[in-house]
Structure formats: structure tokens, C-alpha cells
Image: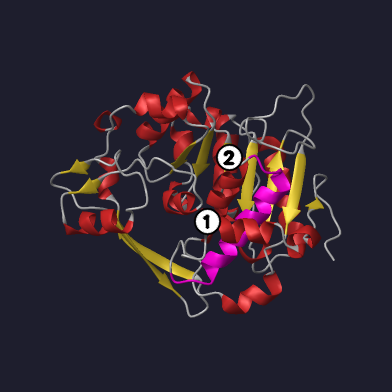
């Protein structure tokens, strides 16, 4: 996400760690457009690696990687962290950090009134915020359907509530039924996590929040009467793009990054979602997770096109809609 946000001129500060090895040299060279001053070098541990294995269709089969360095990362290795958080309009965390690091950063954000975006990253890591009290203070989350189900179950367990078995597949279930199930989960979840963006692969995005008909989400709206709102957006140019898919790896991060970039630019919420979906579409058509085609000019140019104005969203707040 730091890569994509940088290409969209958001100037993020990237916080992570590398090993003292040749892999780190490659990372630093590739990321020369990103602020890497808060990426310490750790001795006696390898730089993280990840290799996605894809089907011919571009779909992810599985991934192979070494993320052990994340268990050695400590916030005390990052200088001026508090000052950076205090000056940030938004802090983005993913689940590669340990639950202890996630909790520490989240509570620093709480103390400084800075909103937090949590990107689950991986199905098996998606519930890390629920291992501590960090989940109580997340502002945005951007799970896919599988991650959302696990996070919903974790939230229900926190409240000692029974969770019925949720059996839904994006491939074998009608879109209307998928949206209805998601809305049922999110109605409960937004009481604790105000803004949920559910990525639905080829189907697009479902945005859920408790702020009614607001046009902007940063700074966080202050409303006297909470009103649940669920809005569905089809994938960008979905009928033509499906045959062009090269790799799904990176599309979710590109969506989130372009959405965030739109919010930071003060764009209308509707346009933030659409430019996020456009960035995801560009990623799908490239072997690079964040392709060179994702630029501020390309995104903004598309945002003023007739395609964007004709691209209608659908209110599914009640859990039912006519998508035909």
C-alpha cells in the first residue's frame, strides 16, 4: 500500500523492517520513491519474502513466504514514531505485525485522535486485532468476504454471542444473497468498527457505515443520529476486464490505496470508491502488484470521464436490492 500511495502522491511514511542482506538492497532500490527512513535494519534475520503462485486465470492458488522478521520488529526501533502519528491524517496497519505491535500503535492513535485503517492482508491473520483490545478502536477495515466472516465471528465471541454457521462462496452463491449476508454481519459490526469496505473480487465493493448519506469520511463525520448505510459498487468495467486478468495479487491493496488517496484529497465518497476500483482493475491487468499505470494523472483523468458519471452505485442497506 505504501508503494501505491506514493505513486498517487500521498507521501506515506513506510514503517517496517529489513534484514541485513542482499534482499534488503533490492527492496530499498525498488522502493526508492517511498520514504523508507523508518525502516530499521535488523541483524541475524532475513528480509521478508513472499511469492504468490497463480493459476492461468490469474487467480491466487497459494503463497509461499518468510515473514519471520515481523516477530522481531519492535516499535522502539522507530525514531519519532509518536510525532509521525500525531501529524498523520490516517494510520494504516496490516496484519503482518504482531498483535502486540498492532495494539500499541492503535492505542497511540487513540491518544492522538488519529483514525486507523486495518488491512487484514491474510485470512489466517485477519483476526489479530481481536487478540487484544485493539479492535475496539479501529476506524476502517477492508476485508475480503472470507476475512469478514472470521472477523465477524471474532467480534461475536467477544460479546459472548452465538454465531450461526456462515456458508457463502463468491463462486457458487448469487450476488444478491452474498450482499444480504454481508449486510446482516455489518449491521452488527459497524457499532464497533464504523467503516467497513468489503472487497468482493469480480463483483466489486460493498461499503458499509453508520453515517447515513455523508459525502466524506475524513475527518470522521460527527452525526447525532446514526443511520446504517450499505452501498454496492460493481467492479470497474467488469465485463471487459475479466478476460484481461493477469494477476489478482495486489488488487485489494491498490483499491484501498486509491480510496485513501481520494479521501485525503477531499474527494466525494462515491468518487473515492470508484477510483479505488479503477486502481484495482489496473492491478489485475499487470504482473506487478502496483503497476506503473497507477498514477495520479491516470486516476484523476478517469475520474472526470463519462464512464465514471454513468457508473451507478446501489443502496442495499435493507439487505435486499434489484441488481438486474
- Which dot marks residue 11? none
Is most of the magenta stretch helix, strand or loop?
helix
Residue 28 showing in the rendered view: yes
Relative to 313, say whether 184 is above or below. above
Relative to 45, say whether 302 is above or below. below
Residue count near mark 2 (Cα–Cα under 10 Å), binned few <14, some 14–19, many ≥20: some
Region rendered in magenta? 266-287
Q: Which residue is mark 2?
A: 264
Quadrant of the image containing the C terminus? bottom right
Would you identify the image quadrant in which residue 219 lies?
top right
The CA distance from mark 1 to mark 2 is: 15 Å
Q: Residue at x 44, y 34 (%)?
A: 131
| Label 2 SS | helix
Q: Position of residue 321 (x, y in %)?
A: 84, 55
Q: Residue at x 20, y 52 (%)?
A: 46
Q: Position of residue 228 (x, y in %)?
A: 77, 36
Farthest left residue in view: 44
Mark 1 vs 2, N-terminal side: 1
Q: Which residue is mark 1?
A: 254
Farthest top residue in view: 111
Judge whether residue 279 is colored magenta.
yes
Amino acid at each position: 500500500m505504501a508503494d501505491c500511495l506514493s505513486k498517487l502522491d500521498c507521501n506515506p511514511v513506510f514503517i517496517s523492517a529489513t534484514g541485513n542482506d542482499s534482499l534488503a538492497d533490492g527492496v530499498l532500490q525498488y522502493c526508492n520513491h517511498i520514504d523508507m527512513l523508518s525502516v530499521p535494519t535488523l541483524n541475524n534475520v532475513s528480509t521478508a519474502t513472499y511469492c504468490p503462485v497463480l493459476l492461468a486465470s490469474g487467480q491466487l492458488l497459494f503463497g509461499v513466504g518468510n515473514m519471520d522478521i515481523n516477530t522481531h520488529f519492535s516499535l522502539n526501533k522507530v525514531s519519532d514514531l509518536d510525532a509521525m502519528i500525531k501529524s498523520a491524517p490516517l494510520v494504516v496497519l496490516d496484519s503482518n505485525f504482531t498483535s502486540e505491535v498492532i495494539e500499541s500503535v492503535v492505542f497511540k492513535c487513540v491518544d492522538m485522535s488519529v483514525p486507523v485503517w486495518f488491512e487484514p492482508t491474510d485470512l489466517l491473520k485477519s483476526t489479530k486485532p481481536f487478540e487484544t483490545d485493539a479492535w475496539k478502536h479501529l476506524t476502517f477495515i477492508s476485508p475480503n468476504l472470507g476475512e469478514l466472516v472470521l472477523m465477524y465471528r471474532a467480534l461475536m465471541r467477544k460479546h459472548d454471542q452465538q454465531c450461526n454457521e456462515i456458508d457463502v462462496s463468491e463462486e457458487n452463491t448469487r450476488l444478491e444473497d452474498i450482499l444480504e449476508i454481508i449486510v446482516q454481519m455489518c449491521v452488527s459490526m459497524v457499532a464497533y468498527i464504523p467503516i467497513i469496505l468489503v472487497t468482493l473480487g469480480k463483483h466489486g465493493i460493498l461499503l458499509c457505515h453508520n453515517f447515513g448519506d455523508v459525502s466524506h469520511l475524513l475527518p470522521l463525520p460527527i452525526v447525532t443520529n446514526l443511520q446504517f448505510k450499505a452501498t454496492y459498487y460493481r467492479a470497474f468495467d467488469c465485463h471487459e476486464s475479466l478476460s484481461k486478468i493477469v494477476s489478482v495479487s495486489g488488487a485489494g491493496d491498490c483499491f484501498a490505496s486509491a480510496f485513501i488517496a481520494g479521501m485525503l484529497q477531499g474527494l466525494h465518497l462515491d468518487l473515492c470508491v470508484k477510483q479505488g476500483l479503477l486502481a484495482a482493475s489496473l492491478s489485475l491487468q499487470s504482473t506487478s502488484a502496483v503497476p506503473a499505470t497507477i498514477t495520479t494523472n491516470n486516476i484523476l483523468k478517469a475520474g472526470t470521464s463519462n464512464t465514471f458519471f454513468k457508473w451507478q452505485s446501489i443502496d442495499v442497506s435493507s439487505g435486499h436490492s434489484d441488481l438486474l
